[in-house]
Image: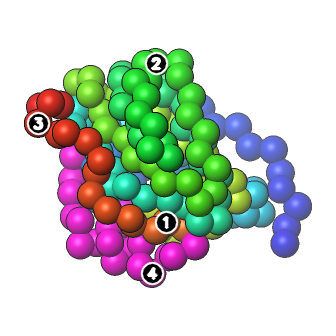
Amino acid sequence: MNTPVPIIRAPGAGEKRSFLGGGLHIWKLMAEDTNGALFLFEDALAKGKCTPLHRHPEADELTYLIEGELIVKIDGKESHLTAGSVSYVPKGVEHAFVVVSEHARILTLQNPAVGQDFYWGASDPATDDVVDRLDLARLQASAQANPSGVEMLGPPPFDLTAVS
């Protein structure tokens, strides 16, 4: 392993990737930057974007809501988050979210960085700023190829008709 070095990234800096579960990622820190300690990405999301019910078997996840509104369901409990809110999900705990505002931006950090390969496998280099690309087959394939990163447990646990 290499010794980590200090890193500063300006607003908008970092690799842009089109996440095929919906969202535009800007990778701020990668596993390679932190010797696998963590990764951090900014995610731009459109209204109605939701995650399936899932868990991260080997990583804790912290999400900070920069702007917008989300409904999160963590370990069966539903909460409404607004800008400035944070959620922490310990490894192995089931969770999901849905965007209920017109758009949202979040920062997601996972520790350790074992889940990075899942996100990388379910995304492509971004060629534009479109945030709503969906390829559920690719998302599921990446989850199956990276079981330490994410385990899909079921469909989104929300009434999505109330979001549109």
Amino acid type of disc 1? Val
Please, what is the three-letter code of the amino acid marked with disc 3?
Thr
Nearer the N terminus, badge 2 or badge 3?
2
Q: Which mark is residue 145?
A: 4
Residue in the image at 70% along x and 59% along y: 112
- Point out the tag, 4 or 2, that comes first from the N-terminus: 2
User: Image height check: is 164 above or below 120?
Assistant: above
Along the line of sight, the residue nearer the viewer: 28 or 88: 88
- Look at the numbered disc 3 and give the secondary structure of its residue: helix
The local secondary structure at tag 2 comes to loop
On the rendered structure, is 54 left or right of 110? left
Name the outermost residue toward the bottom.
145
Distance, label 4 to label 1, CA atoms, is 10 Å
| Residue depicted at 36% across the width and 29% down the height | 70
Query: Disc 2 versus disc 1: distance between alpha carbons?
Result: 26 Å
Whether 18 is drawn above or below 146: the answer is above
User: Which residues are drawn in magenta?
Assistant: 120-148
The image position of residue 88, as x and y in percent, is 61, 39
Q: Are marks 3 and 4 in contact (CB under 8 Å)?
A: no
Question: Of callouts 3 and 4, which one flags the residue occurring earlier in the amino acid sequence?
Answer: 4
- Which of marks 1 and 2 precedes in the sequence? 2
